[in-house]
Amino acid sequence: MIEVIKTTLADQIYTILRDDIISQRIKCGEKLTLKALQERFDISSTPIREAIKRLSQEGLVEHVTNVGAKVIDIKEKDIIEIYDFCSVLDSAALEYAMRSSEFDELVYELENCIKSQEISLNINDMTSFKLHSDNFHDILYKYADNSRLYDAARNIRSQFTILTNKYQNYINAETNVLTEHKELLEAIKSKDVEKASSIMARHFEHAKNYLLKALEEGN
């Protein structure tokens, strides 16, 4: 029997708006007015309010006095906090994953992921490269097998993805990302937790510095 997953209007609006925000089709700092959204979706305000409330709880939307709901406007302090927190969470996922009883499967999936990154880079498909790059980290969470760690990472990674999408035309660091992923894989294969954690921290520090430079130069 096929399982039918029922979704409410609020769920559907939330999913659409979340994707628009993360992909930056709706830009950072942009207002979300009930009138405009009602016209766009041709529905009442109730499911829209519910969707915006969920986006606010996820940290993607903020409410400003005399302005209303707007997409978060990420500043220097936010970049530092987001990347530092992601670094801590991913390092924890890394350590859990390296203790997995399915260690060989972990290595196999990471190797395939890196091969996919190489193919994407060779054909200059940066959209595909980014997806495989994100998947590298997703694999670590999969084998970490810690639901609370995953839940903590989910919300902050939404903000993280906004940043990478917002500055994707500025950042040209794909080769560095691939190199660091390869270094990380070798440390994982050798079961050197300390070295792997050090590489992960450096990986996020480099990415953070790229974005801070982009912000400084007004991009």
Image (cartoon, helix red, strand yellow):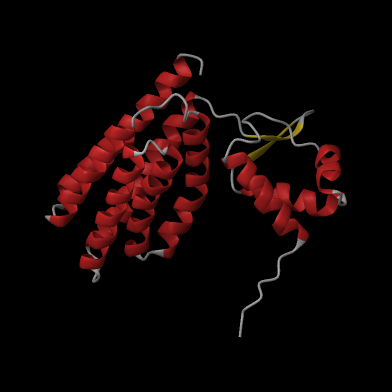
The residue that appears at 44% across and 61% down in the rendered structure is 148
Q: Is residue 134 left or right of residue 70?
A: left
* Quadrant that contains the N terminus: bottom right
Residue 114 rendering spot, x and y as whole percentages: 28, 49
Q: In this view, does 81 lie above or below 8?
A: above
Q: Quadrant of residue 31?
A: top right
Q: In this view, does 82 lie to the left or right of 139?
A: right
Instruction: Tell which of 64 and 30 is nearer to you.
Output: 30
Q: In this view, does 151 lie to the left or right of 34?
A: left
Count of all numbered marks drawn on residues in the image: 0
The residue that appears at 51% across and 35% down in the rendered structure is 165
The residue that appears at 69% across and 30% down in the rendered structure is 30
Q: Is residue 79 above or below residue 199?
A: above
Instruction: Tell which of 73 and 8 is nearer to you.
Output: 8
Residue 47 rendering spot, x and y as whole percentages: 80, 54
Residue 137 rendering spot, x and y as whole percentages: 35, 51
Q: In which quarter of the image is residue 67?
A: top right
Q: In this view, does 125 lie to the left or right of 7?
A: left
Q: Residue furthest top?
A: 217
Q: Quadrant of residue 198?
A: top left
Q: Which residue lies furthest to the bottom in this view?
A: 1
The residue that appears at 44% across and 34% down in the rendered structure is 81
